Amino acid sequence: MQRNSIFLLLFVALTGLISACSDMGKPAEEELSILKANNHPMLMKYCNDCHAPPKPVEHKSSEWTNVIYRMNNHRIMNSLDAIPENDKKELLAYLISNASDS
Ligand code: HEC
């Protein structure tokens, strides 16, 4: 009998803790979009070889084309595959539409 109530108490305490934690871990809508914004599969594929992929908000929309041009040259100079034209277009469109002034 007493054993059961201890288990019950533990159960209540644990479920309380777990639900408190899951509330805490819930990112706000804005944080979520920043996480997503830095998580485009092409950023991981073409930018992660040399440094952590940048966030689109690190540049203005007018600057990204030059940055990607320079990074593509870094890739070629380091004997990595150049970014295929279609992927470059898609990545640029994504960076530009999430840039700091977009
Ligand atoms: C082959 C290595 C390499 C790869 C791959 C690479 N970078 Fe870079 N990146 C560099 C180097 C070296 C620098 C510092 C010199 C410079 O800025 O050119 C740099 C600097 C940067 C900077 C900071 C300088 C600035 O102009 O703001 C950004 C942003 C950046 N890279 C974005 C990217 C993106 C986006 C990709 C993927 C498309 C990428 N990089 C892939 C080597 C690389």
Image: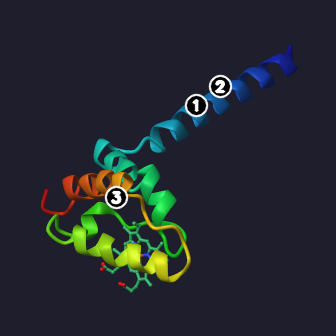
Q: How is the image coloured?
A: rainbow
Say what secondary structure mark 2 lies in. helix
Answer with the quarter of the image where residue 15 lies: top right
Vertical side of 39 occupied by 99: above or below: below
Type of the residue with mark 1: Gly
Answer with the quarter of the image where residue 67 lies: bottom left
Q: Residue at x 17, y 68 (%)?
A: 60
Between marks 2 and 1, how big is the CA–CA gap? Answer: 6 Å
Answer with the quarter of the image where residue 18 lies: top right
Say what secondary structure mark 3 lies in. helix
Choose mark 3 or mark 1, whichever is in front: 3
Are dots 3 and 2 in contact, CB under 8 Å? Answer: no
Q: Residue at x 32, y 47 (%)?
A: 33
User: For residue 16, which numbered disc appears in the image?
Assistant: 1
| Quarter of the image that includes the N terminus | top right
Specify few, some or many for label 1: CA neighbours under 10 Å numbering under 14, 14-19, or 20 or more: few
Vertical side of 18 occupied by 48: above or below: below
Are dots 2 and 1 in contact, CB under 8 Å? Answer: yes
Between marks 3 and 1, how big is the CA–CA gap? Answer: 48 Å
User: For residue 88, which numbered disc appears in the image?
Assistant: 3
Task: Kindly tell me whether mark 2's CB lies below 8 Å from ligand 1.
Answer: no
Task: Kindly tell me whether mark 1's CB lies below 8 Å from ligand 1.
Answer: no
Type of the residue with mark 3: Lys
Viewer-proximal residue, 21 or 39?
39
Vertical side of 49 occupied by 39: above or below: above
Earlier-in-chain disc, 3 versus 1: 1
Earlier-in-chain disc, 3 versus 2: 2
Vertical side of 51 occupied by 40: above or below: above
The residue where tag 2 is placed is 12
Choose mark 3 or mark 2, whichever is in front: 3
Q: Residue at x 67, y 32 (%)?
A: 14
